[in-house]
């Protein structure tokens, strides 16, 4: 009993965590906005500084700064009146940022290895494949590689372990295959000039697919509402909260179709070095790496859903609300991630 | 909506420019990662010599920077409560050094200097983080004529709501300037 209650608490915490992480970037940024515009007493003949300028002026008041150099006098460091020479404390590198830094390094190692292989040093092949694998695992942790779809889906629908593996692997396989296929086709037509065309193609498919991801989220939420209504009417026999293989394959096909640009770049780098076989091997290994990540997230979500279902039993009649809530939250996660990805495609145009 | 989702990596250096009138532009020096460099250089290198002719460089300008125009060439400068729009891009040059693609260009703005300080924050980064731009603002250069007084420092973007979409490691260059 204790174990069940614990699972329920943990599941809810994790769900909140996931929901939060999808939006945390905007949230935390908004949360960090310093209260601006301390009202300044109006001084005769001077305009009060706009809010933004006030925030900047405050920063200047606290800092040591440099003076611009000219050709005659080089830059000098000067103090403002009450300079404390304190930098605003640098925010801790988030987990994502560390992953980004590691990925940058892995990419550098990848290029070194490919160059070594090209010069005939086949001794590095295992090292190269290990790096590909690691790169795949880390790369899939970034958004747009299927993770939140898998999580959202299996929170919403009761899945088996096999289905978890299938959806995680399926999304990743299609995600990689579409990149390799699109790149090979374009390469055959355009040869070395392929990459800008790939980017255009990817951009189009990307937006369409993100719209479909949002639709999947809305459908899951619709199912949650429908089941909730049916439960209210005690129409329980019509309810099927289980994942079906048809759905799993459909979700994998629709959301995985966006070609993975990271795979495409590595494949193209191999092709430009006339190593077709290596391009296929490396993309396969990166794919397996990304599968590990997506399957892992799928299995966690299935575990959570199982935990929720078990714990809900002891709520007796209220259990049905818990089921519906889980489905609804799954839908929200899918919808939100689709929406964020979709908006990201148009971010910050000046 | 800032995602740690880098597919392309750029190491950038900037120089902020002032002329007699005030803030006039930012000189950009971008060095791309080797994989993206290979892909892009190959896409324009029609004679396959691994170097970039004037014509090939021009093609790269439209392929890479053409797409970035609506993102203000990743040069986000806050003035007041908005970003300044790049007025002109000049002095574009593409080259290859150490198998890496190097872009040099200057984006022009114009904010006249007054008798009181005007304040700017300059950032060179991709808010979507599809391209991860690493730009060390501590080592940014600022050059101004004798008649303009410019003070600056590098710091995080914390507290600036206009930059909330950027990842937290992105630094800005804070500048204030006036007529001497």
Image: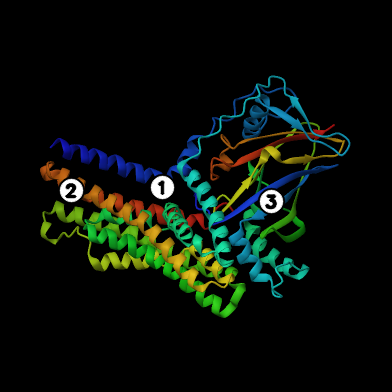
| Alpha carbon separation for disc pair 2 and 1 | 24 Å
The reply to the same-chain question for discs 3 and 1 is no
Q: Residue A22 has which mark?
A: 1
Residue A133, above or below A268? above
Packing grade of label 3 (10 A; few <14, some 14-19, many >=20) is many
Specify the subunit that label 2 lies on: A
Q: What residue would you read off at disc 2?
A: A309
Could you tell me residue B26's position as x and y percent?
74, 47
Q: Is residue A259 visible?
A: no
Q: What residue would you read off at disc 3?
A: B85
- Residue B51 location, quadrant: bottom right
> Considering the numbered disc 2 on the image, is that residue within a helix, a strand or a loop?
helix
| Alpha carbon separation for disc pair 3 and 1 | 30 Å
Residue B58, above or below B105? below
| Alpha carbon separation for disc pair 3 and 2 | 54 Å
- Residue A274 location, quadrant: bottom right
Residue extending farthest bottom:
A189
């Amino acid at each position: 009993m204790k174990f069940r209650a614990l699972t329920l608490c943990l599941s809810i915490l994790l769900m909140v965590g996931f929901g939060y992480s999808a939006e945390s970037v905007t949230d935390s940024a908004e949360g960090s906005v310093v209260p601006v515009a301390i009202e300044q007493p109006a001084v005769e003949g001077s305009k009060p500084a706009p809010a933004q300028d006030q925030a900047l002026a405050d920063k200047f008041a606290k800092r040591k700064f440099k003076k611009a150099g000219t050709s005659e006098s080089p830059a000098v460091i000067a103090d403002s009146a009450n300079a404390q020479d304190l930098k605003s404390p640098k925010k801790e590198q988030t987990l994502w940022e560390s992953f980004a830094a590691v990925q940058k390094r892995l990419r550098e190692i990848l290029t070194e290895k490919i160059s070594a292989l090209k010069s005939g040093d086949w001794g590095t092949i295992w090292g190269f494949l290990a790096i590909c694998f690691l790169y795949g695992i880390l790369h899939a942790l970034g958004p747009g590689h299927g993770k939140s779809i898998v999580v959202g889906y299996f929170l919403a629908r009761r899945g088996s372990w096999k289905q978890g593996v299938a959806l995680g692997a399926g999304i990743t396989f299609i995600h990689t295959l579409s990149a390799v296929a699109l790149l090979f086709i374009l390469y055959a037509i355009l040869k070395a000039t392929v990459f800008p065309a790939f980017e255009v193609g990817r951009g189009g498919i990307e937006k369409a697919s993100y719209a479909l991801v949002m639709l999947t989220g809305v459908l899951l939420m619709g199912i949650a509402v429908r089941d909730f209504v049916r439960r209210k009417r005690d129409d329980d026999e019509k309810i099927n909260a289980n994942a079906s293989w048809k759905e799993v394959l459909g979700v994998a096909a629709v959301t995985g179709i966006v070609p993975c640009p990271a795979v495409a770049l590595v494949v193209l780098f191999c092709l430009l070095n006339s190593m077709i076989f290596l391009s296929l091997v490396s993309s396969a290994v990166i794919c397996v790496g990304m599968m590990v990540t997506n399957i892992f997230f799928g299995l966690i979500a299935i575990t959570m859903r199982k935990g929720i279902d078990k714990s809900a039993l002891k709520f007796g009649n209220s259990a049905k609300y818990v089921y519906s809530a889980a489905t609804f939250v799954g839908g929200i996660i899918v919808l939100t991630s689709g929406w964020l990805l979709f908006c990201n495609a148009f971010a910050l145009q000046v | 909506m800032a995602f740690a989702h880098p597919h392309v990596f750029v190491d950038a250096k900037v120089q902020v420019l002032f002329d007699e009138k005030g803030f006039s532009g930012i000189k950009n020096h971008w060095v791309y990662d080797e994989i993206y460099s290979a892909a892009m250089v190959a896409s324009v290198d029609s004679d396959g010599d691994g170097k970039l002719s004037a014509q090939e460089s021009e093609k790269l300008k439209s392929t890479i920077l053409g797409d970035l125009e609506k993102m203000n060439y990743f040069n986000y400068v806050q003035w007041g409560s908005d970003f300044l729009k790049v007025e002109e891009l000049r002095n574009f040059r593409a080259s290859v050094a150490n198998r890496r693609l190097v872009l040099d260009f200057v984006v022009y703005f114009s904010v006249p200097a007054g008798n009181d300080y005007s304040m700017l924050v300059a950032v060179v980064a991709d808010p979507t983080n599809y391209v991860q731009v690493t730009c060390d603002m501590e080592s940014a250069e600022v050059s101004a004529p004798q008649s303009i007084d410019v003070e600056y420092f590098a710091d995080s973007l914390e507290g600036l709501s206009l930059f909330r979409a950027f990842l937290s490691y992105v630094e800005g260059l804070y500048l204030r300037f006036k007529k001497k």
